[in-house]
Amino acid sequence: VSGPETLSLSSLQKWVFPQKRTAEERAASARPAESVPFRGHISGGLQPGKTIVLFGVVDPRPDRFYVALTCGRGTSREPPPDVALELCVRFGDRHVVRRACVSGSWGDAERAIPFFPFIRGQPFKLEVRCERTRFRVFVDGVQLCDFLHRLTSLGDVDTLWIKGNIAVTKLA
């Protein structure tokens, strides 16, 4: 999170969700990283000018991973009924699906991207920049897509969720 607040990996609550990685795959990845899934509080909520930065490493045999910005914590297995942005990175069809959920109802998904930036077993830097009318998503410094806000009260977006086939090495 940009500005004076930062998310600490050690202070994030674990998100209970079954993992697809085997014990051998976890042991083979000899990199210092925080396991996923987890969720963390965004101090002060989102506002234009704030940026979420995630440094991670894609698993060697990934299926998909998710990054979501939500209003509240939800339950241990499900996000709350308001999701400002959910990014689903799918390796099978090489899509980055974006969608939002307002009052429990998921809107249309957006899939168009100019390139698929994620590589199996490789590190990446994902930035989600909050602007007045949209989120801008960058991977390794290159813009991947925009997503217009579906929720109007950005200050209520106070939780970052991450799950799937990645290891998180740093949040800022």
Image (cartoon, rainbow, N blue to C red):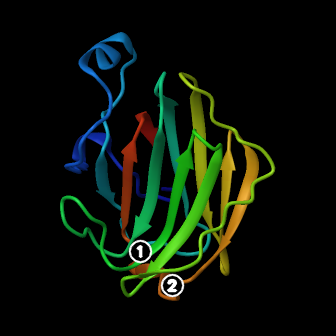
Q: Nearer the viewer, residue 171 or 165?
A: 165
Helix, strand or loop status at disc 2: loop
Q: Nearer the viewer, residue 67 or 158?
A: 67
Q: Which numbered mark, 2 or 1, is in the foreground of this view? A: 2
For residue 157, the mark is: 1
- The image position of residue 157, as x and y in percent, is 41, 74
- The image position of residue 125, as x and y in percent, is 59, 39
Left or right: residue 149 versus residue 117 is: left
On screen, residue 39 above or below 32 = below
Q: Residue at x 71, y 41 (%)?
A: 116
On screen, residue 129 above or below 6 = below
- The image position of residue 169, as x and y in percent, is 43, 32
Helix, strand or loop status at disc 1: loop
Q: Nearer the viewer, residue 2 or 72?
A: 72
For label 1, the crowd category at 10 Å Cα-Cα, with few meaning under 14, some 14 to 19 and many 20 or more, is many
Left or right: residue 108 versus residue 146 is: left
Q: Residue at x 39, y 42 (%)?
A: 164
Q: Quadrant of residue 149?
A: bottom right
For label 2, the crowd category at 10 Å Cα-Cα, with few meaning under 14, some 14 to 19 and many 20 or more, is some
- The image position of residue 93, as x and y in percent, is 63, 44
Q: Residue at x 65, y 43 (%)?
A: 94
On screen, residue 18 above or below 151 = above
For residue 151, the mark is: 2
